Image: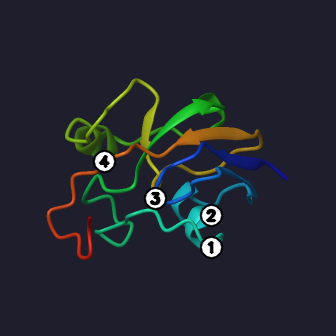
Amino acid sequence: MPQIIVLPHLELCPEGAAIEANTGDSICDTLLNNEIDIEHACDQVCACTTCHVIIREGFKSLNESSEKEDDLLDKAWGLEPNSRLSCQALVGKEDIVIEIPKYSINMAKEGHR
């Protein structure tokens, strides 16, 4: 069973985490199911960029991104070549290391600091 290693994020996962993941599940679902409350303002329908993550290791083991995802990623804060929307990136058979960016573009976020 592959793991998702989450690098430390000040608000969402200060200590970082190593999470067991099921092949074929989205990164977003896996994080949410393990109490890492990543933003997902569009309810995971590939209509925003709030669940943007950067894949530091294991990028090639994920499914390919769609044209729609690629178009949305162009609007994400802190875009890098290995960026994905976690709602669209499906876990493959290898471990992956992700970084959740410090900021997201979420105009409707409630309770932000």
Marks 4 and 1, the one that precedes in the sequence: 1
Q: Position of residue 44 (x, y in %)?
A: 39, 66
Q: Dot 2: few (<14), some (14–19), or many (≥20) neighbours within 10 Å? A: many
Q: Mark 2 is on which residue type?
A: Thr
Query: What residue is pinned by disc 3?
Result: 11
Q: Dot 1: few (<14), some (14–19), or many (≥20) neighbours within 10 Å? A: few
Query: What residue is pinned by disc 4?
Result: 103
Q: Secondary structure at mark 1?
A: helix
Q: Position of residue 91 (x, y in %)?
A: 65, 49
Please say if 6 is above or below 106.
above
Residue visible at 60% across and 42% down? 7
Query: What residue is pinned by disc 2?
Result: 30
Q: Mark 4 is on which residue type?
A: Tyr
Q: Position of residue 31 (x, y in %)?
A: 59, 63
Query: What residue is pinned by disc 1?
Result: 33
* Quarter that holds the C terminus: bottom left
